Image: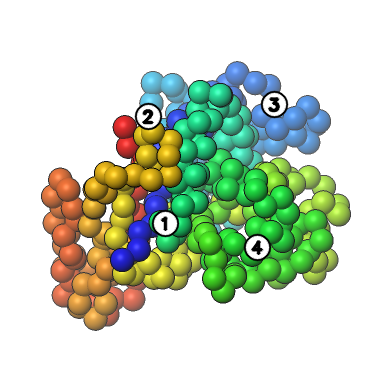
Amino acid sequence: MGCAVFMGAGASKPLGYPLTSEILPAIRDELKNKTTLFGGSPSERQATEDLKRLLNLLLPGFHDESLKLPLVTDILSLIDHSLTAGGMLIPGKTSTDLVNLRRLLERAILNVIESGEDYTDREQPVLDAFCKWLSTGRIDGIISTNYDIAIERELFKPYGTHQGVSRDFDFGIRWRDPNYSRLYQPPADPRFKFYKLHGSLNWLRCECCEHVYINTYGEIGVLAYEEASEANLCDCGHAPLSTVLVAPRSSGMFATRTCWQFGSMRWNCCGPPTNGSSSDTRSPRKISPFARCSSGRPTLAAARIVPESPSCKREKTKERVQPISCSSPNATTARTDWMAFSAWRA
């Protein structure tokens, strides 16, 4: 039976990246301490002022440091839901204002995450050991909800080119080379199955043809906020390309389809060997995966997908999650709960 690694925000924290709960407070601090968040031009200064104004309207008291802020992903989900449902999230503001708020918030998130990229020589050996462990062939898949690219950037280094990466990496989607617009299909026999459920800083998407561009050399999200040019032009002629920062609630369709491939896997929390070698004699600590309801019968899955119904119940223990019992499997809506744990343990 195979094993998959699930990486939440805690996996990137040792490398200097913020936890999800730290992103919105960091944005608040930067808005308070800097005259401009995005640059010195008049349009960028205006964008900073627009972000301040809209966040204060959405979250009254946003600038009060004594108040605990919600998760930034919850804010993105709230905006997405309001846009989908056609609701008025901010009185007196239109859907255009909400789209602008989401775009500005995405840009601020990119700034915060990129500024957290400060891991030193002390953390590099840990990252090297972890990536070496992932490369041993013992891992069937890697699932990440992180926007940063700390892990995959290390895994990409031996390949040197986008084409080299395309032969060994399955991202769950077909993707284009940002340099030459080559279209790559998921390989038939990949060495790595690397699924980023919430998007990534090195992804851009065309809102016209829906193609995704993946840069295996580094982040390219900032190109989405520049004037239309060859650098952010899609092969179909549309520009500029957009960032791919998916809110958890709106990632259900892609996440569900991807995670179904891990239906028979167990989770392995053993982590990389502490001595830096590729072998590990410790017995891995098993954690039961979430179960999903399928015609009333619990089935193993990497994610827990259950119909939203009062009759759905979940029983938790300290070490495992029991199978879900649901008496109404034909409900049309579903809720996705993700299991997050650190990729390595102390």
Residue identified by numbered label 4 = 166
Residue 131 position in % (x across, y down): 50, 44
Q: Which mark is residue 36?
A: 3
Under circle 3, the secondary element is: loop
Residue identified by numbered label 2 = 68
Quarter of the image with the N terminus is bottom left
User: Around disc 3, counting alpha carbons within 10 Å, would you say few (fewer than 14), some (14 to 19), or many (20 or more)?
Assistant: some
Q: Which residue appears at 22% of the width and 57% of the height? A: 288
The Cα atoms of the two marked residues, 2 and 1, are separated by: 38 Å
User: Around disc 2, counting alpha carbons within 10 Å, would you say few (fewer than 14), some (14 to 19), or many (20 or more)?
Assistant: few
Kind of residue at disc 4: Ser
Against 26, is 193 above or below? below
Residue identified by numbered label 1 = 139
User: Around disc 1, counting alpha carbons within 10 Å, would you say few (fewer than 14), some (14 to 19), or many (20 or more)?
Assistant: some
Under circle 2, the secondary element is: loop
The Cα atoms of the two marked residues, 3 and 4, are separated by: 39 Å
